[in-house]
Image: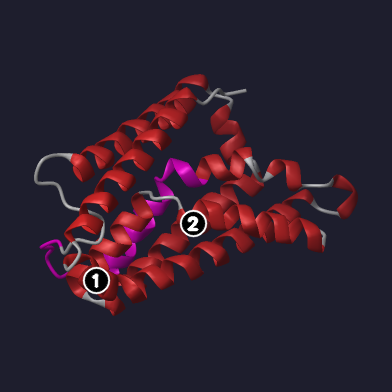
Amino acid sequence: MPSGDTLLVFAALSLGLAITPGPNMLYLVSRSLAQGTVAGMVSLLGCQAGSLAIMLCAAGGITAALLAIPYAWDALRLGGAAYLLFLAWQCVRPGGQPIFAPRPMPREPAARLFGVGFATAALNPKVALFYMAVLPPFLDPERGSLFLQAAVLGALQIAVCAAWDALLVWGAAGTARFLSTKPLWMAVQRWVLGAALALLAVKLAAESRA
């Protein structure tokens, strides 16, 4: 089992991952604004299930095998970068809307909300990169099973992200109401989020397989 210090440091890094804008955050906030908190929470469960699937793959070494295939890794990396750039453009384009702006979306049944949330997280390269780049240095062969250590740390990351995302879902409507009365805040939020997404895209595109 990981030590207490290891768990604390990894939890802090997990929080950094959670607060970084990405596809999960955009989907959860959009769905919460369009269909309400309950729909947002169902979508949240789907997202965390998708993250759990990636974590188990990483813990079992499947993601490492993917990284050993150059073209598969490049497709994931460049595809993820292109998607992040698309999200950045959606934020800053003329007439674009910020992440907390209400969006007309059709009401969906719980099963579809869960399924789309699962796919959004499972196909999110940010999560896979986090597990492959950040998790391995925290594993210590002298502390027992590496798979168990990876699973414990992965579960901690999922718990931290779930808590943060739940706050976003629960506060989405109130945050949207506040920002709607502050045009300057709305503009700043659009450009800050767009810049953050663009920087993430550049960093992801420049990642080395090594």
Tag 1: amino acid: Phe
Residue 109, given in percent of the width and then of the height, sits at: 21, 72
Tally the marks: 2
Residue 121, given in percent of the width and then of the height, sits at: 41, 53
Residue 28 bears which disc, if any?
A: none
Of the residues tagged 1 and 2, which is closer to the observer? 1
Query: Is residue 43 found left or right of 18 in the rendered image?
Result: left
The local secondary structure at tag 2 comes to: helix
Question: Which residue is denoted by mark 2 in the rendering?
Answer: 18
Comes first in the chain, label 1 or label 2: 2
Image quarter in which the N terminus is found: bottom right
Query: Is residue 207 found left or right of 82 in the rendered image?
Result: right
Residue 123, given in percent of the width and then of the height, sits at: 39, 45
10 or 119: nearer the eye? 10
Which residue sits furthest top? 70
Image quarter in which the C terminus is found: top right
- Residue range of the region highlighted in magenta in the rendering: 103-127
Q: CA distance from mark 1 to mark 2?
A: 22 Å
34 or 200: nearer the eye? 200
Question: Which residue is denoted by mark 1 in the rendering?
Answer: 178
User: Label 2 neighbourhood size at 10 Å, few (<14), some (14-19), many (20+)?
Assistant: many
Residue drawn where x is 64% and y is 59% of the image: 11
Above or below, comparing residue 131 to residue 203 in the picture? below
Above or below, comparing residue 152 to residue 197 in the picture? below
Above or below, comparing residue 56 to residue 174 in the picture? above
Residue drawn where x is 46% and y is 30% of the image: 203
